[in-house]
């Protein structure tokens, strides 16, 4: 089976959407009918995706951990991917969310953790890329910042995992399940805007930039020159946006639609 080449600097997953969507189509149908997220067949589907992503060395075990205090976790040292979706299933059974929303959340979580495995492999292999720089920045920031839980989704590696996983799900529903496409679009818009606050003058500002002191600025400067990042990379990793991109993002949040400029930037 053809493997994904993660040495490509841009859109390392988008070039393989067709292969991935075929797997997801079968997996989605199976879960929609059964909701057996933790059975052997579900794990088989995940391992098939792991193989496609060429992550067999990084992920040897899949554990649907009932005691996990979050929905997903990638344990690098143990080469283990852990998922706990009991709370989301409970919400579904209580009619708080519908089945489509449940599965969009599940698949977003699954690919979020798979992308963390990719980030760690690039970190260990020291493959020079923006992803490597951002993983190094994130590790240092997480070590030094006290309020880690509140800021968790703002760190560059977390934003990347959230946005890239949401793009995968958006693309899948756009091509295979258009009747549920709006939910996947809402999911992507949420993660694109998550971490950006609206100021008095109507411009989005990333709160992680507010907490940067001289020490954190030095960490970023040591690993990356923000000025050379593309607009997409600034959006992906949570750095301050230029005025035009801020307006595009704000418009998408207000209209609840990924507009054509964002589609082009995200290569959807």
Image (cartoon, rainbow, N blue to C red):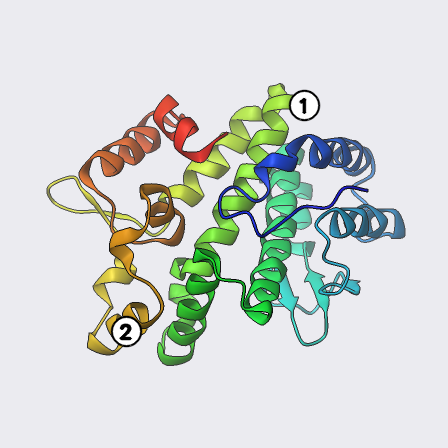
Local packing at callout 1 (Cα closer than 10 Å; few below 14, some 14-19, many 20+) is some
Residue 162 marker: none
Determine contact: label 1, label 2, CB under 8 Å.
Answer: no
Q: Residue 134: x percent and y percent?
A: 42, 62
Q: Residue 245: x percent and y percent?
A: 26, 36
Helix, strand, or loop for circle 2?
helix
Residue of label 1 = 176
Q: Residue 169: x percent and y percent?
A: 59, 36
Q: Residue furthest right?
A: 40
Q: Is residue 143 above or below residue 50?
A: below
Q: Is residue 119 above or below residue 162?
A: below
Q: Which residue is drawn at 29% across and 49% down?
A: 196
Q: Which residue is drawn at 10% across and 41% down?
A: 201
Q: In which quarter of the image is residue 216?
A: bottom left
Residue of label 2 = 216
Locate residue 161 relative to residue 42 in the image: left or right.
left
Front residue (pair 75, 14)? 14
Q: Residue at x 32, y 72 (%)?
A: 222
Front residue (pair 13, 63)? 13
Front residue (pair 40, 213)? 213
Locate residue 244 relative to residue 20 in the image: left or right.
left
Observer-side mark, 1 or 2, equals: 2
Give the Cα separation between the discs numbered 1 and 2: 43 Å
Helix, strand, or loop for circle 1?
helix
Q: In which quarter of the image is residue 133?
A: bottom left
Front residue (pair 3, 33)? 3
Q: Which of marks 1 and 2 is nearer the N terminus?
A: 1
Locate residue 198 relative to residue 148 in the image: left or right.
left
């Amino acid at each position: 089976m053809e493997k994904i080449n993660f040495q490509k600097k841009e859109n390392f997953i988008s070039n393989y959407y067709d292969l991935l969507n075929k797997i997801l189509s079968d997996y989605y149908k199976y879960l929609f009918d059964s909701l057996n997220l933790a059975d052997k067949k579900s794990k088989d589907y995940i391992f098939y995706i792991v193989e496609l992503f060429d992550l067999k060395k990084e992920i040897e075990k899949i554990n649907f951990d009932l005691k996990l205090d979050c929905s997903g976790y990638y344990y690098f040292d143990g080469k283990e991917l852990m998922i706990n979706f009991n709370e989301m299933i409970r919400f579904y059974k209580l009619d708080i969310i519908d089945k489509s929303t449940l599965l969009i959340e599940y698949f977003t979580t699954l690919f979020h953790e798979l992308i963390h495995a990719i980030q760690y492999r690039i970190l260990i292999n020291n493959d020079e890329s923006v992803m490597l720089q951002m993983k190094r920045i994130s590790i240092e920031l997480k070590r030094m910042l006290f309020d880690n839980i509140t800021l968790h989704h703002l760190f560059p590696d977390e934003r990347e995992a959230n946005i890239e996983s949401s793009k995968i799900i958006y693309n899948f529903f756009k091509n295979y399940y258009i009747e549920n496409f709006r939910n996947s679009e809402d999911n992507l818009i949420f993660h694109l805007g998550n971490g950006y606050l609206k100021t008095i003058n109507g411009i989005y500002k990333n709160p992680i930039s507010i907490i940067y002191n001289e020490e954190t600025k030095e960490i970023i400067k040591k690993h990356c020159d923000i000025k050379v990042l593309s607009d997409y990379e600034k959006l992906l990793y949570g750095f301050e946006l230029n005025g035009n991109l801020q307006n595009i993002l704000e418009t998408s949040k207000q209209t609840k639609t990924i507009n054509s400029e964002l589609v082009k930037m995200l290569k959807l």
